[in-house]
Amino acid sequence: MKKWIVSLLVACLVFLPSLTQVEASSEASIPNEVSVKLKYHLKERKAIPFNFKGNYQLAGSGFELKQDRNYEVKLNGGVIELYENSKKIKSFNQTFEIKPVKYGKSNYIRLNGRPYLGSIHFTIENNYLVPVNKLPMEDYLKGVLPSEIYPSWHIEALKAQAVAARTYALKRVHQIITDDVGSQRYDGYIWWDESKYAKTNEAVNATKGQVLTYRGSLIDAVFSSNNGGYSEANKGAWPGGSQLDYLNAKADPYDPAFDWNLMLRSQQMEVESLDLEVPQEWWGTTQEIGVQNPLKFASTDEAKVINNVKNHIKKNTLALKEANIKIVGINDVAVSNSTTPGQRRTHGSYTIEYFVQNKDGSFVMETTNVDNEEKTRLKLHTFEQVNSPIAAMRGIFGINDFKSHFVTSISLKDGIYNIKGKGWGHGVGMSQYGAKAMADQGKAYTDILGFYYEGTTFSNYISDHINNSLRGSDRYETSAAIAKYGWNQGFQTVVIGRGDNPVDALTGSVLAKKYDAPLLLVKTNELPSSVKELLLTQTIHQIFVLGGHAAISDKTVSELSKYATQVTRIKGSDRYDTSVEVAANIDAGEEVILTSGSSTSPDALSVASHAALNQIPILFTKVDELPESVQKYLKDNNVKKVTIIGGKNAVSAEVEAKLSNLVGEVVKRVSGPDRYATSVAIVNEYNLDPRNLFFARGEQFIDALPGSVLAAKMDAPLLLTKKDTLPDVVSDYINENIHYVPSIHYFGGTGAISESTRSKIELDILK
């Protein structure tokens, strides 16, 4: 059956070192993402056509591809070329990457017609194009399950498969795995048809993040289609490894113990009737007996097995890779009496006789003495294995026909070998058909996994992706903690803001992003010790101080000058003028963002990632009046687009009308009924990457001010929450959009966001 075939995914795997717990990382990457080498559907390609839905760009360049165009990637020597509507538009040395501007189901790429979520990294391997698909774990699994197990099976069997597949993949998350049976079969974004794949999607969602561990480490959750009624020990399947406590051999009363058999004739060519001196006269019209008139058995036939034998010999004999061979005879087929703990045979023997025609059409001949006369005749070759590991025997006859090492008998009668056995696959770990039987008997997926992986415990990898380190004993120490985390490789520029009133520093996120600088908080008349200690560890060339003398005193600026080559104060006569002065230090275009200048408004904080990422200045306004300095900036810089962040209670309709008079019709408002809804509206409006999610307290957001720069550094959204309650609008956003496990970052300690609110966030993500 189809799923038996695809379930042979770990027949040749070796066990790898246990995965250690994921440490917090400041890189703009997603620790639980999977990189999948696409070899199954795109094998040995010199050219790959693609198109896409949504918005895609070339990574690292901002070059956007067009949705209404057809693209093709071609390999030309060691150069990868990109074509748009048959016209070459780009060339790359060795590799390039295409990624969505925002990860999600609304953006996907079709490679040769097959859809994939996430990014595609084109590489060269053995003179062929090899695309690598990178996407979050949970969405990857939704493309695995329908390929590894029937979607119509009982939901508890599907859940068991989801946990096993997740554990297997997470253990190898720092490697590039493949989409074929060398890892796990993966068919991409086939689950867009949610009606067809509703049950497999449900199984992944219902077990979101769940993995199996043994003594604190991820297990090797190997599985196979059917174990023949007796599971194999890992050391029985792979003798070189150590025996694992949770993968012992034992009887399996649930596995249906499918029988299989393989039949083939010992004599494949009637050599006596052939003129071996002139093989060219009969080679093109003579086939092996098993090909011309194949024996039928199970779901295959003798012709396929003969073809398997030919391909194996050619693959394993260098001189024959491009030759043509014919099988003459198959002899001495036997297995050892010695068995593994799981009752599998350990060794096997066979002898294959064959003729060879070279690539150029000539034949491999030999001169022999026949009746005292030398004759040049077609040479008979031998490919032989004697008492070799049985994997070699299974390999030559074909792993989908010689289905397991669980061989029960081999007989030779009337010139026909009949090899009989049980199961399909290596038989280690979970039996998929055994899992189905248990589920059909009413067993839960936890019972299924407990039976097949004895002594293991359930864990959830979401706990490895929660960043609680962005906090300190006060806001100043918190800002230093954020800088240490986000800029752990060091920094040469710093932006300084006032810690007791965030208003001047709120617009500084764009400036900080420009210089890849953290934002640190200080007191008006004092440089906190936590900030001093951090600055001492860096080589600082430039410090920008945001605000006037009343915000940050000359004494504090003087002290800062001890840590940097240059200190520059950016100030205006008030907060509105200061926002204009900050904007003047940015290489701005013809667009600005306008938010409330109120000290209690977090709107500038919520939009910081988008603004900083795109280097769009943030300007402040009064509720009912557009400050003169802001008006002048708009005119002097020929601003043509203004986006207002916040509702009309924050920025009035009168100010909006004034803006329209100044810049024309391109005035847009992004808002919600409150600050929490506004933060969600911003995430929905802009291309921020929700695979990292930052959460900040909306009532007192000073802790999050330095964090907004970190969110911008990681192109990530910042969502506001209440201390003790997760607002419904934020909960709804998570439930509707986060169909994977993101990395979660909390700004401040539990005094800012309580444990109960954090638990609610994490439970919503795991729904």
Image: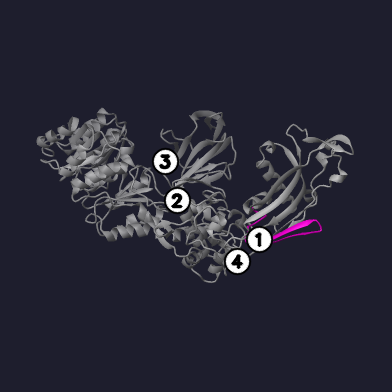
> Position of 577 compared to 429: left or right?
left
Question: Which range is magenta?
Answer: 399-423
Residue 302 showing in the rendered view: yes
Give the mark nearest the N terminus, 2 or 1.
2
Q: Are marks 3 and 2 in contact (CB under 8 Å)?
A: no
Relative height, residue 251 to residue 193 (above, below): below
* Residue annotated with mark 2: 17
The quarter of the image holding the N terminus is bottom right
Cα–Cα span, label 4 and label 1: 19 Å
Crowdedness near tag 1: few (<14), some (14–19) or many (≥20) residues, C-alpha within 10 Å: few
Instruction: Please identify the quarter of the rendering in which residue 635 is found.
Output: top left
Q: Position of residue 349 (x, y in %)?
A: 69, 52
Cα–Cα span, label 2 and label 4: 29 Å
Labels 3, 2: front one: 2
Q: Which mark is residue 229?
A: 4
* Residue annotated with mark 3: 101
Q: Say what amino acid the circle numbered 2 marks.
A: Pro
Labels 4, 1: front one: 1
Toward the viewer: 178 or 639? 178
